[in-house]
Image (cartoon, rainbow, N blue to C red):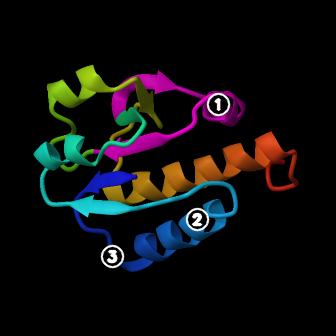
Amino acid sequence: MVSVGKDKGPTLELSEEYAKRLQRFAEVELFELKASDQVLARVRGELWALDQRGVELSSEQLAEKVSRTAQITLAIGGDEGHQPVLREQARFVWSLSKLTLPHRLARVVVLEQLYRAFEIIRGGPYHK
């Protein structure tokens, strides 16, 4: 996952917790960049851009989509969002909500939802 901006405090702790849980299912790398023009250089596999103009998914729909994808780079923009070129190059543009979320909070939500998706795929008890 690539995010523009530095995480700190409680959201950093939560991000690290969900990243640790995700490690049971997939390799997870978290990169914090200073500027959005650095994002494309970090892309490995399919690029998924987080953007409020994207497609909203249920947790089950996300699990289905994740199960069909070998490698994903999730990009979370900074205060100004993503540059148009990044959205155009993204294989998928995902919206967590029509609300604008701070990137630090979005990062926690994305990691938790990815963990939930892998638990759904596994048939585990986490997703109730």
Percent coordinates x, y for residue 37 in the rendering: 11, 44
Give the crowd class for mark 1: few <14, some 14-19, many >=20 residues within 10 Å. few
Q: Which portion, as a residue range, is magenta?
A: 51-76
Tell me if I can see residue 102 in this picture. no
121 or 77, which lies in front?
A: 121
Tell me if I can see residue 29 in this picture. yes
> Which secondary structure lies at badge 1?
loop
- Drawn side of residue 13 relative to residue 100, left or right: right
Q: Is residue 109 above or below residue 100?
A: below
Percent coordinates x, y for residue 95 in the rendering: 43, 31
Give the crowd class for mark 2: few <14, some 14-19, many >=20 residues within 10 Å. many
48 or 58, which lies in front?
A: 48
Percent coordinates x, y for residue 52 in the rendering: 35, 31
Identified by mark 1, the residue type is Ser
| Residue at image location 40% in from the left, 31% down from the top | 98
The mark found on residue 67 in the picture is none
Q: Which residue is mark 3?
A: 8
Identified by mark 3, the residue type is Lys
Specify the quadrant of the image occupied by residue 10. Answer: bottom left
Q: Which residue is mark 1?
A: 58
61 in magenta: yes
Give the crowd class for mark 3: few <14, some 14-19, many >=20 residues within 10 Å. few
